[in-house]
Amino acid sequence: MGLFDVVLFFVVAASNLQWVATAAASGASAVTVWIIGGLAMFAPLSIAVVFLSSHYPDEGGLYVWSKRAFGSFAGFMTGWTYWASTLPYFPALLYFAAGNAAFVAGSRESALSRQPLYFIIVALSGLLLATVVNIYGLQVGKWLTNIGAIARWSVTLLLIALGALAWWKFGSATPITLTTLRPGVQIKDLIFWSVIAFAWTGPEAIAFMGGEIEKPRRTIPLGLAIAAPVIAAIYIAGTLSVLAAVMPQDVNPSSGVMQAIGHAASRFGWNALIPIAALLVGLSCIGSAGAWTGAVARIPFVAGIDDYLPPVFGRMHPRWGSPVAALITQAVISAILIFLGQSGTSVKGAYSVLVSATVVTTLVPFLFLFASALKFRAARATVQTIWIPGGQWTVAAAAIIGLSTTVVGIVFAGFPADDDPNKVLAVLKVIGLTAMMLLSGVAIYLLGRRRAAERRSP
């Protein structure tokens, strides 16, 4: 992967139009929360990733960093929780793609969006495409990521243009004042803050493929510096544009971007833009699926090399240079979750709790990432490493801020929704599922250690 590929990877992996719709549904104060979240999570995370990838540009990213800092168990649990928690992300992302792509059908969108079979077909097709192109290696897989990134930035520019025109011509649908921009501090607001902090993650994903990037010590920092303003514009300007076209209470978190584009385009008589935008949103989501599919598959690959997973996971395809076993395994698990997500009401409820639990678990690896940066802050620089202004003090400050944000995010991400009929039970389920995911990782680690010891014994 060259610089161009890395920039586009950052754009598609570190941004998500789904979060733009979610933020807009909460009102104008989301814009302020985006800025705070960027300073509290994205900036510290970027500094930590640049510092660690510059010093240790190994395949495996935060798995390897945690292992170097705190030993093999910490490394494995960091990789395990990160990998396992991304699996439900694929169905959610592809369902979002299906919901927005339905606007291609025009007047039939409403009927199509109520068809479970449609969502299953689109989600499975997107998952299959993302898996197959990555099996053929990064030389092929990176093009799906690149197309997705270009589509995301294109549809964001269209959204911003339509939002600005609607604001200028008709006035903003949502009042944007100092009062409406002031964020709340009630429990439901703090839960939303944790979601925004989670949305700002993603820069760490590129490091999983550090061994497959040209000059990673230089390419990763430069690529992130170029992509960061684009990511911020997608989130902040995108949210403002949705609010300019649609009132917060009318925003559907699963299709809010297309709602805004469709509403604004219709008012100007530019209905031909709607299916084009819907296609771009769908492509951008499938591009994200491709980026994450390829990136997180490197975690079980490295774990296979270290003997914590069966040896088949640690093998690259001899021709395509891809971790085929890891790619197929995660595709099968995600496909099962797609069917579970579209099953009966009780299963949907269980799936929602599972997603809540995985948000908590997703943030756990960042505890290790920031702790690793804090431990290695005084690592000796070489001519190959990137100089960070302020040196170890900047790295230490970023690590402490990132750790604090992550801890707060974990606490509030576990809180139940206001409309949950049994809040205590919901919290217990999230805690239980999180513990189950962690304990299953411990069990796999211990089995791997035992298997490796048996092979070494005479």
Image: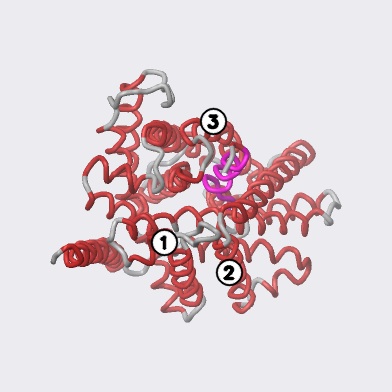
For the residues labelled 2 and 3, say whether their Cβ atoms are less than 8 Å apart: no
**Disc 2 marks which residue?**
128
**Disc 1 marks which residue?**
315
**Up-down: is 20 above or below 179?**
below
- Residue 383 — which label? none
Stretch of the chain drawn in magenta:
4-17
- 418 or 357: nearer the eye? 357
Say if the magenta span includes residue 38. no
Q: Is residue 71 left or right of residue 384?
A: left
Select label 1 or label 2 by which is in front: 1
**Along the polypeptide, which appears first: circle 2 or circle 3?**
2
**Disc 3 marks which residue?**
222
Select label 1 or label 3 by which is in front: 1
- Going by the numbered disc 2, the residue's amino acid type is Leu
Residue sitting farthest toward the top: 390
User: Crowding at label 1, few (<14), some or many (≥20) Cα neighbours within 10 Å?
Assistant: some
Seen at 72% across and 69% down, the residue is 109
Q: Is residue 196 visible?
A: no
- Going by the numbered disc 3, the residue's amino acid type is Leu
